[in-house]
Image (spheres, rainbow, N blue to C red):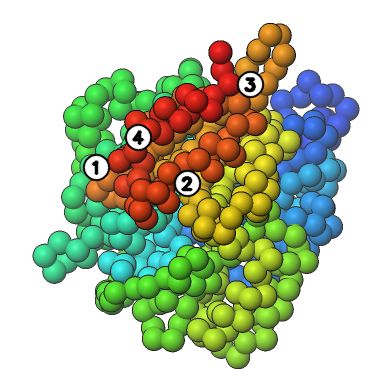
Amino acid sequence: MLYNKELYNKFIKDYCQVLEEYKFDKSVNFKKASAFLGIYEEKSGSTYMIRPRIGAGVVSINELKKLSDLAEKYAQGRLHFTTRQCIQLHRIELENTIKVIEGLIDIGLTTLGAGGNAARNVSCSPLSGVARDEIFDVTSFAELVNEELVKNEDYLFLPRKYKISFSNSSKDTGNATFADLGFIAVKKNKSLGFKVYAGGGLGPSPRIALKIEDFIEPEDIMYYVRGMKIFFEKEGDRENRARARIRHIITRLGEEEFIKRYRQTVDELKKSEDLKINIKINPESRSKGKTDKKEQIHFQKEKGKCSLFIHPPKGIIETGDVRKILNFLESLPYQLDMRLSSNQGIFIRNLDEKDAGILRRMVRYINGEYPVFNSIACIGSKYCKPGVVNSQDLLESILEHFKKVEKAVKENAPKVYISGCPSSCGQHYISPIGFLGKQKKINDVKKTYFRIFLGGRLSEDSSQIGKEYGEMEYTGISYFLERLTLLKIESGIKDINEFIDTYSSQLENMIVEENHVE
């Protein structure tokens, strides 16, 4: 990835200086220097997480191999796939953080702007370029924007983080409708371009993004990227961190005024700067696609080619398993590529159908056989310093519970999304079934509870935040999910969103029955 090496070296130099001071004086503001480099202190207070930027989720075999080497040496032999197409390395000792940064530089990866109040890693539909139902491939646009963000120091000192996403169709598999700035590929008449969305986001006070434009020319995207940066700097709240994200500007100004002022900023920029880009769009190639019943093998545009989705349990994969996969891929006599997903997994793309089947069998002990076993949980309070509860523990208990139920229940149990704090890294708000952890005192004893959200979904035309239906103690959730699954089987409704919409009252009563809250 191209980035401003001089700028990056400046931040690394500053970090090294602060690091030396911090070793002897814990009152030093370590986070001020570390966050810009994607380095965060973990819950233990003695280990750290490092997150490199992986623009559009595009990762090469060599990069993944070297990341595994670094994890083997410094991060207890594990890689954590995130919900924003990144890879995190955990449990790194303080003195080893700079060694990891140097190792990433050796393979062309930067951590600049991977944390802090900066423009973050740009996300993209993970099957863009091979999906049968896409409008066009948006990968090059996402990569270009990501590179622009790390070339320019202006994007590092914002009121709060700034997240940008690209989707290749109205299915919004790139999560554009809940990004700070989102682009969705569209065809209008015979022209290809983008719809523009802004002001979305999860975390506290979640919001689905506003549609800003129905159609813009692809060459104009940087006016909207830079325009939002300028608008954010002018209108964002630098005093109150809790109200600092772009979506809070909408709350303050109102939707119409937000759109009006943002458009004015873009128009002024068009008059003063030449930010047009030139990326050739590959002609669309749309055909009816199919996915195997376990949602692991996706058939591509090109006849005989497939993408295999690999989702390690809880998003954590051992480096030995990574090497096993990469050794197989390197043995194939043709080119393929890989994309990280936004749900803690990775797509191996451009596989021959036969090889996809072989690899799928090789990783069946990693991949969940049914949707519930591919559920999502953030890294949780065991590692994450702001984490309130250990979301991974809840997921583990759900997985263990459903290993023991009848096959029909296993097959029909839905995937769930779990967050351990209001930051919502588990994406619980936009999933059909989501859980948000909290601590609650009952008779002076702290207990773990989860707020329950149902009906969230993601699509250009129907994105919505899940409705909160109550809360439940940790110990009751697996049984609640089993009862929900049995009701779903009885209903005969296959689609989980349709089922929740139809049976919302019964589910609410079920939560009350299962709930141990007085």
Q: Which secondary structure, mark 3?
A: strand
Answer yes or no: do the residues labelled 4 and 1 have beta carbons within 8 Å? no
Residue at the spot of label 1: 211
Marks 3 and 2 sit apart, C-alpha to C-alpha, by: 29 Å
In which quadrant of the rendered image does the C terminus lie?
top right
Q: Residue at x 19, y 63 (%)?
A: 187
Q: In screen coordinates, is 163 left or right of 474?
A: left
Camera-nearest residue between 405 and 54: 405
Name which residue type carries label 3.
Answer: Gln
Residue at the spot of label 2: 486
Marks 4 and 2 sit apart, C-alpha to C-alpha, by: 15 Å
Is tag 4's residue or tag 1's residue first in the polypeptide sequence? 1
Dot in front, 1 or 3 = 3
Marks 4 and 1 sit apart, C-alpha to C-alpha, by: 29 Å
Camera-nearest residue between 104 and 195: 195
Q: Position of residue 447 (x, y in %)?
A: 67, 21
Answer yes or no: do the residues labelled 1 and 3 have beta carbons within 8 Å? no
Q: In this view, does 270 lie above or below 348?
A: above
Q: In this view, does 230 lie above or below 513?
A: below
Q: Which residue is drawn at 60% across and 74% down?
A: 360
Q: Which secondary structure, mark 1?
A: strand
Answer yes or no: do the residues labelled 4 and 3 have beta carbons within 8 Å? no
Residue 430 visible here: yes
Dot in front, 1 or 2 = 2
Camera-nearest residue between 445 and 301: 445
Name which residue type carries label 1.
Answer: Lys
Q: Where is residue 417 in the image (x, y as percent from the top left)?
A: 52, 43
Please tell me how crowded label 1 is: few (under 14), some (14-19), or many (20+) other residues with Cα within 10 Å.
some
Q: In this view, does 326 lie above or below 76?
A: below
Q: Where is residue 19 in the image (x, y as percent from the top left)?
A: 79, 36
Residue at the spot of label 3: 439
